Amino acid sequence: MQLTWIEQKILGLFVKSKGWLSKPLFGGRGMLFMLHRVLPEQQILRYPLNHGLAITPETLEKIILYLIHENYRFLALDDVEKKLHNTKNKQPFVVFTLDDGYADNFVHGKPIFEKFEIPFTVFVTSSFPEGTSFPWWYALEDMLKQAGELVLRNEDNPLHFSWQNAEEGAALYPSIAQRFKQNDTPKNRNYLQGLFDADALNRARTFAAPASWEQLKKEASHPLVTLAAHTKHHFRLASLTEEEAWEEIEGSKQALENQLGQPITHFAYPYGGIGDFTARDVALVKQAGFKTAAVNYPGNILNSPKLELLTLPRYPLGERMTVEKLKQIRNGIAHFAAHGFKSSYIS
């Protein structure tokens, strides 16, 4: 959101005071972190335009050690509401969540969480374990590494993109990716998949190796693991009709419950940023019976009666997270920079 000029002045004071002024107001009770992948550095470097989706085990451990030093308590999603009702315990909390359902969450991530006995939630897109995922973000980066062109149809005029080398291709990635995200719907998916050659799409699917149903069934009984829903096909809900959105939301819940044999009570909106879902979708998530739902928008969990458990904010956690950024999260500067005086993502 755009801060007012008064909020900008106040933000400057918060920064100058190094959080001393902001922490009592906006430090909050705790926060959620959003991860996607936990990978060795060499694997992250294979797709540099998507580096923000991954973190190394070493960096994850450093962040956990910092949070331990700062006296954070690590919670499972199931415990967040209970913690908020306990106003006597002022110890700040952290919840770790990982989106999509990659196998590396358990291969490289779980050993770190186990080492420190930290619970974590994996939001599973059910097409991932079914082997029908469409990780276009990797296939697109692959396409842009060499000179080429791409024509995207839309209702008005086709959008034409061309690039002469990898540098030009990288510069185009954000605008093309936005178009893919907005236009990836049940009606358009086959068309979008057809824009990539089979080898590029297979490379993307291989790199985005999902956890199998067999693996997820095994992990479902782990005391530190919570499995949750992330729709069926990772469509941007705001681009769908109400019927399509309901099928994605409620259908993912049913798919996971049928496969895992346990209730699925938590949800994360695909992409999850401003405009990627609407109030309609929040209502559908509530109708489907989810207890919490997470967004992709920064913010601390404040002591506020307006807190909406179906739009819980999350800070993205990737390889470039630094201690300085963590300090700004802890002292409320990051929250105020994102929200100003608004108390939550939707208020």
Image: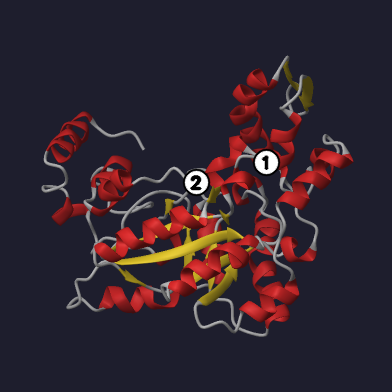
The kind of residue tagged 2 is Gly
Nearer to the camera, 93 or 1: 93
Residue 2 as seen in the image, left or right of residue 16? right
Name the residue that disc number 1 marks: 137
Nearer to the camera, 158 or 54: 54
Q: Position of residue 246 (x, y in %)?
A: 65, 62
- How busy is the neighbourhood of tag 1: few (under 14 within 10 Å), some, or many (20 plus)? some
Task: Tell me what residue is drawn at x 24 percent, y 67 percent.
Answer: 71
Question: Can residue 12 be seen in this snapshot?
Answer: yes
Task: Tell me what residue is drawn at x 30 percent, y 66 percent.
Answer: 68
Name the residue that disc number 2 marks: 273
Does 32 appear above or below 291?
above
Nearer to the camera, 239 or 320: 320
Does 308 appear above or below 222?
above
| Picture quadrant of residue 193 | top right
Q: According to the image, what is the colour scheme of the structure? A: secondary structure
- How busy is the neighbourhood of tag 2: few (under 14 within 10 Å), some, or many (20 plus)? some
Per the image, label 2 sits on a secondary structure element best described as loop
Residue 272 as seen in the image, left or right of residue 309? right
The kind of residue tagged 1 is Trp
Q: Position of residue 56 (x, y in %)?
A: 52, 52
Task: Tell me what residue is drawn at x 78 percent, y 24 percent.
Answer: 150
Task: Tell me what residue is drawn at x 26 percent, y 49 percent.
Answer: 327
Camera-nearest label, 1 or 2: 1
